[in-house]
Image (tube, grey):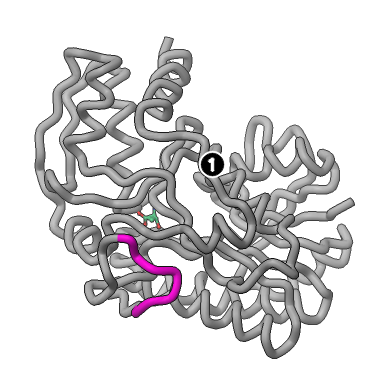
Amino acid sequence: MKNILVVGSTGQIGSELTLKLRKLYHLDHVVAGYVPGAEPHGLVLESGPSEIVDVCNARQIAQVVDHYRIDTIYNLAALLSATAERAPLRAWDIQMNGLLNLLEISREKHCALFTPSSIGSFGPQTPRDDTPQDTIQRPTSMYGITKVATELLSDYYFHKYGVDTRSVRFPGLISYTKLPGGGTTDYAVEIYYSAVRGEEFVCPIAAGTYMDMMYMPDALKAAVEIMEADPARLVHRNAFNITAMSFEPGQICEAIRQEIPDFRMRYEVDPVRQAIADSWPNRMDDSCARQEWDWKPEYDLPTMTQDMIQHLRQTFE
Ligand code: VAH
């Protein structure tokens, strides 16, 4: 039976991943790590243990790992791309010094460690269509720089010390339980909230800007499956390209109009997020994940849109 620590358990991914892991592995064996000011609430608080775990406090992490005999850590502590541009040094501290703390503790205490990368780890020189698993990565955002460094450090700890590090490059993630905070792909979540509220959506990303996207249930499935994969099949470790769909704002708007015909959208481009989006791929090639651990998404744009609208209508009724 695994004993799991989720660092950043109250964020967009962490809050849902914690609940999924508790269903899979047992309520008491999944610890929700959080920082003061981002306390767990609702089911994350009530369904299992939670502890203060600041990724920049190595002693605190080690105490929790020892107390709960943790053998697997999901590290979801990060400032997303647009926020990281406003606080680059803080983003480096969390994403790099914090990661080093977790890698060292995983080395000393024999924990497996998942630290996601992102389409943000690519840059303007990266091939934009069918972006290969192994290709040039020269991101121009602090978020992307930390994600490339995360991939390299995680691979280093695997090859040098045998630490069981594995991860994926997440696309933009879309969910109905918690709004993301400060990402370039956040528009693809916020648009659904506007549509269900009957409001016109003001899109910060320009028409024709394609980005890889994924519905949260598929992202959670990937986070579990990669850590359960047969290590003998893994040629890569950190971090697998995975995607489910690629769309530009006009296409998600049209998909919503199939469900809410009077939905309206206009554009007011945010130059910071647009510059970041322009440096990212249009669509990744995820064939390595499909070959090495049988990755396969379940949702596409129409089925995600139907499910998002159905759940948000329940929330707002
Ligand atoms: C962001 N949602 O926009 C995050 C993610 C692939 C994008 O890293 O920063």
Residue at the (22%, 72%) spot, across then down: 124
Question: Is residue 238 found inside the magenta-colored segment of the image?
Answer: no
Seen at 17% across and 39% down, the residue is: 203
Residue at the (81%, 81%) spot, across then down: 108
Q: Is residue 259 left or right of residue 162?
A: left
Q: Which residue is mark 1?
A: 218
Q: Amino acid at mark 1?
A: Asp
> Magenta stretch?
130-136
Residue 233 x, y percent position in the rendering: 69, 67
Most foreground residue, 299 or 277 = 299
Ligand 1 occupies quarter: bottom left
Does 293 appear above or below 136?
Answer: above
Location of residue 312 (image quadrant) = top left
Up/down of 282 relative to 196, above or below: below
- Residue placed most toward the observer, 63 or 195: 195
On whether residue 134 falls in the magenta region, the answer is yes
Compared with 301, 79 (above or below) is below
Q: Position of residue 37 (x, y in %)?
A: 55, 50
